[in-house]
Image: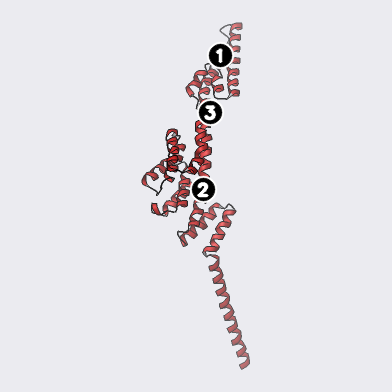
Amino acid sequence: MQGQALRYWAASVALGLSFWFGSSAFTQTAEDLFDFEHGLKFARFLEQQQRWDLAIAEYHRLDAETPDRLEVRMALLQLYALDGKPSDGIATYEGWNYQPQLAPTELRRKYIGLFFQNRDFTLLGSRLQGGIGLKEPDKTRVQLQLALYNRDWPQARKLFDAFEIQHVHKNQQTYAPILKALDDLHYRKPWLGAALSIVPGAGQAYAGQWIDGLSSLFLVGVTGFEAYRLLHKRGPKNLLAWGLAGMSLSFYVANIYGGRRAVARYNQRRDAEIQQILDGVSARDF
């Protein structure tokens, strides 16, 4: 009996020790799984899988537990840009409450880039006036980008020339293609497109839309000619002739309006070309 009791006691001790060691190992493993390095690897894995929402949530967890890690905050702003939520990225940056002069340069640049992605130029202008810690030549560079987005070409030229005074040739090289495109930019006059449309299709042709111009000329010409032919052949009481005449007049009025709109679209396409170059600069350098 005594030997059996001793065996029971030894088995209980062994079971208790194994349970204690197992629990400790499990606790240690769980702690390891949620430490910063493992969390960062997991967040990057989610990022590679393009699981933007989950990656953002994980980076926010890391930022809450280990604040002021630049790599985490840079990743957060980058992910908000990739996820198409620049306003959330702006709010996140501003929630960090950096002193303007102490904000990391790379992080502030990414923050400014979110404004360009969001097209919230009014808010960006107010932030610049309030001071976000920008120094020269970055201040001139952001103001130039803003002037270009706002299509303030004279101000953009003035700011571009300021790089020469500041001896920042790298910035000049970045924006030289955009200024070259502005030099080659020739807007056309919408009122002239409408005036030329007195000759059906001429306004669209002035805007480079030859097919639309020929279509307008064909519709106005065919319906007008048929109305004239029927009136001449069957007299003024022919309802079909008057219907065709009304249709021809409608096509003619629409052609004048279309000539004006065609020129407006032409100018919009020219602006879009500039905007596309600007978006490339914003995505690459901000």
Mark 3 surroundings: few (<14), some (14-19) or many (≥20) residues within 10 A: many
Give the distance between the C-alpha atoms of the residues marked 3 and 1, in whole angstroms. 31 Å
User: Where does label 1 land, which residue?
Assistant: 245
Q: Check if mark 2's residue and mark 1's residue have beta carbons within 8 Å.
A: no
Task: Answer above or below: position of 278 versus 261.
Answer: below
Rendered location of residue 85, percent (x, y) = 50, 47
Residue corresponding to mark 3 = 266
- Callout 1: 10 Å neighbours few (<14), some, many (20+)? many
User: What residue is rendered at 55% in x and 52% in y?
Assistant: 52
Query: In the rendered structure, which amino acid carries the disc numbered 2?
Result: Ala
**Residue 129 appears in view:** yes
Kindly tell me whether residue 88 is visible in this rendering: no
Q: Which mark is residue 81?
A: 2
Residue closest to the eye, 130 or 170: 170
Residue at disc 1, secondary structure: helix
Residues at marks 3 and 2, CA–CA distance in whole angstroms: 30 Å
SS category of the residue bearing label 3: helix
Q: Nearer the viewer, residue 183 or 62?
A: 183
Going by the numbered disc 1, the residue's amino acid type is Ala
- Foreground mark, 2 or 1? 2
What percent of the width, then of the height, locates residue 87?
46, 47
Disc 2 is placed on an element classified as: helix
